[in-house]
Amino acid sequence: MSPIPVATRANEMHTVVSKWRESSAKIALVPTMGALHEGHMAHLSHARKRAENVVVSIFVNPAQFAPKEDFDRYPRDLMSDARKLYFAGGADLIYAPSTNEIYPEGVVSKPVVDGPAASLESDFRPHFFGGVVAVVEKLFRQVEPDFATFGEKDYQQLLVVKRLARQLDMNVEILAVPIVRESDGLALSSRNAYLSAEERKIAPALFYALQDVAARIRSGHEIAQAEAEGNAALLTAGFDRVDYCAVRDAQTLRPIREFTAPSRVLGAAWLGKTRLIDNIAV
Ligand code: AMP
């Protein structure tokens, strides 16, 4: 038994949400892929501050996984997620649709590799933002939330979704949620569960490397050199491969030559079969 109401069909979800709307209550959506952790719970409290009613969606979106990625082994446990939400103060509704409910015509997405989606994740996961945009647009149209939370953990995704919300003219305000970290600095992620004990010890080095790059840039080091040093530090720490360690403009994610405006250091690196991403503000 779920301690929180669960809707698996869009029309069931709609019946509940329409009732709330009659009393002009604000509605916030927290989109997730489940395997919830404290990072997701931070979204719950952000959502609560702005809206009387909170819908947490749990949907492992096939459109954002390439064929050889971890879609099949991605952790799924709806009852455990529902309990976590309950003990964290509760959501008002869990929306856990089937793939057919989101993609009745089959899984479709158009590539999105421009604007803030250009490079970084798109260089390594070219299908990714197309999949994200497909599911987020669908969820926005189905739930019609006043607010939706997205994590800075996936900073590039946050910017892509902000742009999508502007393009859709849907009056949904995107709330950015800061990164929740373990005590050793590792950003919480559902994928951390894949790490072996040995890999888990190495994992926080991603955060430390990004911090070092940020410190170098603040003290006037050349950007390309700081990026190269970050890259090398990750390999020395024990990462098997680095997809990128890059300094970008915080608004546009375009490469920068000099540190003159708010910037972001973003990194993606592999420990065995697990790909970790993280980023920090400069
Ligand atoms: P996911 O279930 O991994 O798709 O994440 C759902 C939402 O939670 C996304 O907006 C993520 O950016 C966000 N999120 C994931 N990890 C964290 C974290 N450590 N701190 C804050 N938000 C997070």
Image (tube, rainbow, N blue to C red):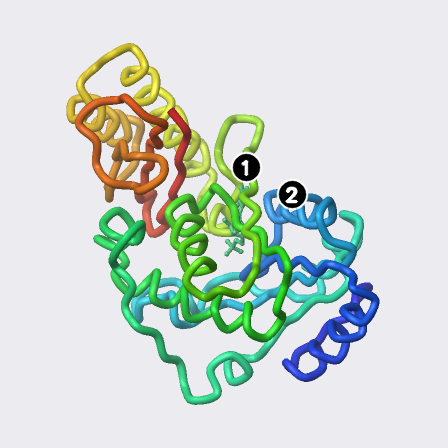
Q: Residues within 10 Å of mark 1 (few under 14, many from 20)?
A: some
Which residue bears the numbered disc 2?
Answer: 42
Label 2 to label 1, Cα distance in Å? 8 Å
| Residue lying at the far bottom of the rendered structure | 105
Left or right, 8 with respect to 150, comes to: right
Which of the pair 267/11 is nearer the observer? 11
- Name the kind of residue labelled 1 in the image: Pro
Task: Say which residue appears at 36% left-offset and 27% top-offset.
Answer: 262
Give residue 67's position: percent from left, percent from top: 30, 71
Specify whether tag 1 is near ligand 1 (CB below 8 Å): yes
- Name the kind of residue labelled 2 in the image: Ala
Which of the pair 158/58 is nearer the observer? 158
Q: Do the residues under discs 2 and 1 have CB atoms within 8 angstroms?
A: yes
Q: Quadrant of the N terminus?
A: bottom right
Give residue 30's position: percent from left, percent from top: 61, 57
Q: Earlier in the sequence, mark 2 or mark 1?
A: 2
Q: Is residue 198 above or below residue 99?
A: above
Give residue 57's position: percent from left, percent from top: 62, 65
Task: Say which residue appears at 25% left-offset and 34% top-offset.
Answer: 246
The circle drawn on residue 121 is: none
Specify whether tag 2 is near ligand 1 (CB below 8 Å): yes
Which residue bears the numbered disc 1?
Answer: 178
Q: Residues within 10 Å of mark 2 (few under 14, many from 20)?
A: some
Left or right, 85 with respect to 185, comes to: right
